[in-house]
Image (tube, rainbow, N blue to C red):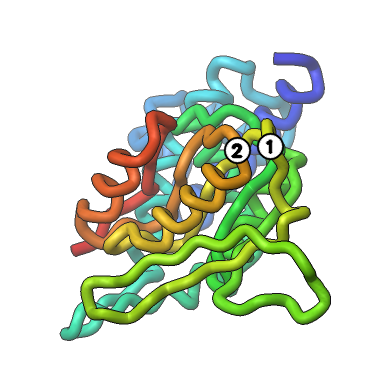
Amino acid sequence: MNRAEKAALQLQAVAVLRMLKTDRTYAELAAETGLPDGDLNRYVNGHVLPGADRAERIVGEIGQEAIAQELRSRVSVDDEGYVDNSAIVFDQSFLDRVAPVAATSVGFERPDVVLTAATDGITLGAAMASYFDARLAYAKKSKETAVEEFIEARQRLSSGIELTYYLPAAGLAAGESVLIVDDLIRSGETQELLLDIAAQADAAVVGVFTLIAVGDEGLARARGRTDAPVAALTTVE
């Protein structure tokens, strides 16, 4: 870890603690994190930064559970199983806090490209791409009028509907590393299509990440297609 990466991690740890402190006393925060309340006070108020090892634990362990709880509080599932996560995907500042927690807790390698599907995955993709200083590419269900070459992935769903995604060929090059992200995974069909696009581009997949998994089917399906880490921050039924 170089000096700039260490400083960024320390500041991310402070941001996680400040998020937690909004509805907790220092005594409650100390009990939850296992850190001395005096140290927490100094971190939250900007008097001192946590050391690298402590900062990594705050972001990767404490932050992961905090973000997972926040996700669960913002998502709702109706009687028919439809998920409303608009309070998440429309909040870019929250997604910007998710990115370092996801990267640290799961341990994704730094990608050249973050690949997602339009439209709900774009805000998360932008946050992850910004954190990794990577390019953002997103596949769409329709072709761009002015683009001549596409990478195309197609799948017939169990319902009989055919789902097709198109990525402009310039979006992903052979040999580039790619992190596939999406806001939600249920059946895993969208993630399979994105993995197909990566394979056609001859890109190296470094991970598949989603905020919310609805059950385990989609995660299992993605894990069957790649040896790279596959992770969700929280699961709902």
Could you say whether the residue bearing mark 2 is in a helix, strand or loop?
A: loop
Q: Position of residue 44 (x, y in %)?
A: 63, 39
Q: Is residue 92 left or right of residue 78?
A: right
Residue, x 23% and y 83% (percent of image)?
A: 78
Q: Amino acid at mark 1?
A: Ala
Quadrant position of residue 177 = top right
Badge 1 density bin: few <14, some 14–19, many ≥20, Cα 10 Å: few
Residue, x 69% and y 26% (percent of image)?
A: 49
Quadrant into which the N terminus falls:
top right
Q: Amino acid at mark 2?
A: Asp
Residue, x 50% and y 28% (percent of image)?
A: 107
Mark seen at residue 55: none
Residue designated by label 1: 174
Are the residues flagged by discs 1 and 2 in contact, CB closer than 8 Å? yes
Task: Of the two numbered discs 1 and 2 on the same chain, state the one appearing first in sequence.
Answer: 1
Quadrant position of residue 85 = bottom left
How many marks overall?
A: 2
Residue, x 46% and y 46% (percent of image)?
A: 209
Badge 2 density bin: few <14, some 14–19, many ≥20, Cα 10 Å: some
Q: Is residue 131 left or right of residue 27?
A: right
Could you say whether the residue bearing mark 1 is in a helix, strand or loop?
A: loop
Q: Position of residue 220 (x, y in %)?
A: 24, 45
Q: Position of residue 185 (x, y in %)?
A: 35, 60
Q: Is residue 79 left or right of residue 58?
A: left
Residue designated by label 2: 202
Query: How far, Cα to Cα, is label 1 from label 2?
Result: 5 Å
Rendered position, 185 above or below 148 = above
Residue lying at the far bottom of the rendered structure: 79
Q: Position of residue 224 (x, y in %)?
A: 28, 40
